[in-house]
Amino acid sequence: MPDPILEARSLTKIYGQNVIFKDINIKVTEGETIVIIGPSGTGKSTLLRCMNLLTGVDGGQVFLDGKEITAKGYNEDEVRQHIGMVFQNFLLFNHLTALGNVMIGLTKVKKMPREQAKEKAMEELKRVGLADRADHYPGQLSGGQQQRVAIARALAMDPRVMLFDEPTSALDPELIGEVLGVMEKLARDHMTMLVVTHEMGFAREVADRIIFMEKGSIVEEGAPDDLFDHPQHNRTREFLWKITELYGKKEKEKAGKS
Amino acid sequence: MLVNFVSYIVQGTAITLAVTLIALPFGLVFGLTLALLHTYGGKVLNRLAALYSLFMRGVPPIVLLFILYFILSGRLLNLSAFWAGSLSLGIVSSAYQMEILRGALLAVGGGQMTAARAVGMSRLQSIRYIILPQALRIAIPPWSNEASIVLKDSSLVYALGVPEILRRAQQLSATTQQPFLAYGTAALIYFLLVFATNRALDYLSARTQLPTHP
Amino acid sequence: MKRIFVLVSLLAIVSLVLTACGGGTSSNHLDAIKKAGVIKVGTSADYPPFESVDANGNKVGFDIDLMTEIAKRLNVKLEWVDMPFDSLIAAVQEGKIDAAISSFNYSPERDKTIDFSDAYYTSEDAFTVADGLTGNITKPEDVAAYKVGVQTGTTQDSWLTDNLVKTGKLPEANLFHYDRVDQAMMDLKNGRVDVIMSDYIPAQALATQIGGLKIVYHGVLSSGPLNIVIPNGDKELQQAINDIIKQLKSEGFIDKLAVKYFAQ
């Protein structure tokens, strides 16, 4: 097995008396797409935020390309430009156009000359199919478009790995497809990705590996077909049953609407 | 003679404007620093900034003006009444401007900071390139209100012997026994100044408004 | 604990700054004035005929002319600093100005923080009423039955407070304070108060200007002599000004000024 790009070793996060998650071990290797599923409130989002140091950890270590980034005195700001992150609620910079959103990391963090940054940013916008929206402000874009700009913003930094924190859960159903489409394309292009999502269809089709998390620990992990068709644990089975029920209903609603 | 009197009051306008144009920017720089310390400066600085604001806003401006005047204009610094008065007004205003900007920083929201940090920006870069451009936009309307308050409060420096509009109106009212004319002229000038200031800032606010519809 | 420490050190710094800024005047103040060639004198130019401004913003009045002559004889230039009456004593105390002339009356309270020159003129107090007032005011205590107006911080204010309010003769609610005497007189005319206690000379001037007012009593009650305010313990300046006042009195200069400004 090749060396992992991003690795969590017995990672633990505690808020006051509450253990958010404990002893989590995850290895993300080059070109791999890992999807984390599980009920809400099991610490999946916090886990992602700990892995790019947006939130401090209370135990364990995180490694990027074999270097421990949780080590004391490590330059956090430097680390984050190598780990792209996409948020549930997009979090585009509201005062900048789509192009400005993608450019600002290049000009201010990577200190790239403006012209070069602009060229690169336009390329990234093309990649997510939004070149024609370059001069639109976030307020002028749909949710799906905003999320695609957010993906382009993260991609522009040429990250080693991309973290997706429920990228479609704030979207209207008809806008989910365009975002998942972009993510699928990324996976095909062998971008290394760690995705938290409730989109089971996406998980099954795109993921190389699925991790089922519940109540702050990893219950089970495996290849998509194995985990979906032959879950080893009762809790996994229960969760999958509930979520497919819900997912099926949604699908039916969608069919009924059109 | 009346024409002369009115022009004497109008000459005070230059002083009123000068006092305001010193006090407002000084209060802005000072208030912005305090707002940033309060929001991002950690526990101790947060408390200190809050304490400062509480004190400055809890004491009548005229009282502070006198205290600050005698500090700023003492043997140590020895500023003129004009400068001491203007800076004192700026210090008083800084507490109010701090509150305005603090509210604006809060309104921008923590998410923007998170997103900026996620791109690899330092805290300082995030504040400078992401938070402030948005917060300042949000702050323009309440700041416009503070600008007119400072403009009107600039009349307080008359107590230190700076001959601005109000002080001149008082003198002329005493000389001519026509208080209505004297104070009416002063009121009209203040009104025009405040009106022009608010309109200018409304325009700025509209110009910097972020588009929301396609 | 930490917070208390921060507070205490802040207070310490503030008091340090205040001490550094305050402090008494140097003993050779007069020499310093002569060396600089300028004397900075404070006045509240809103009290005609003693001190006011003319149509061009120039200071005019009894005190103004007097001080101009005193400066001339001190052989220094005169620089006027105009500020509200209430600020003048503090400004002298803090050394912002070298002296103040603004029809100040001697009072033991004021004498604690600043010094006075010899009297350059003796003024009387007056009670002014509107023409239509019913009732009789023959002696000062009679005003206790009316609504009385007075300028804040003046000797008349102290006199009314000490002799009528504190003795229970005049209800506190019936003593009305004004920033300026002319405002008080306007209110008198408009019927908001019944009697104004003020200096006699400006009362005469205002009664004539405004019309419909009359002075029902005048005499030395609260004020009397007018003095120039100088910094506490400033013997040299006090002596120099006193000498000049003496000269001016003997030359008839001050009587001439009184005729110029106070003659009806």
Image (cartoon, grey):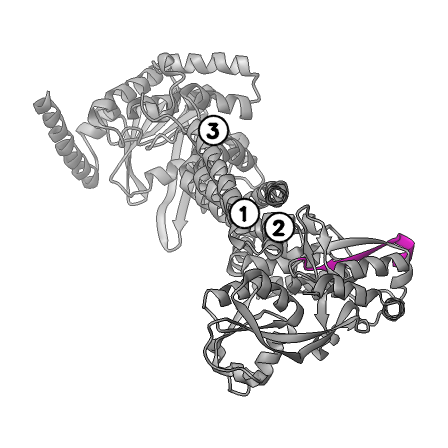
Q: How many marks?
A: 3
Q: Which residue is mark 2?
A: B168
Q: Is residue C116 visible?
A: yes
- How far is disc 1 from disc 3 in space, using C-alphas? 54 Å
Q: Is residue C37 magenta?
A: yes
Residue sitting nearer the eye, C184 or C206: C206
- How far is disc 3 from disc 2 in space, using C-alphas? 57 Å
Residue B99 falls left or right of residue C116: left
Quarter of the figure with residue C104: bottom right
Which callout, 2 or 1, points at the residue further toward the start of the chain? 2
Which circle, 1 or 3, is nearer the viewer? 1
Quarter of the image for the C terminus of chain C: give it: bottom right
Residue sitting nearer the eye, B113 or B34: B34
Asked which secondary structure carries label 3, the reply is: helix
The residue positioned 39% from the left and 51% from the top of the image is A15
Task: Give the label on residue B119, or none.
Answer: 3
The residue positioned 56% from the left and 84% from the top of the image is C138
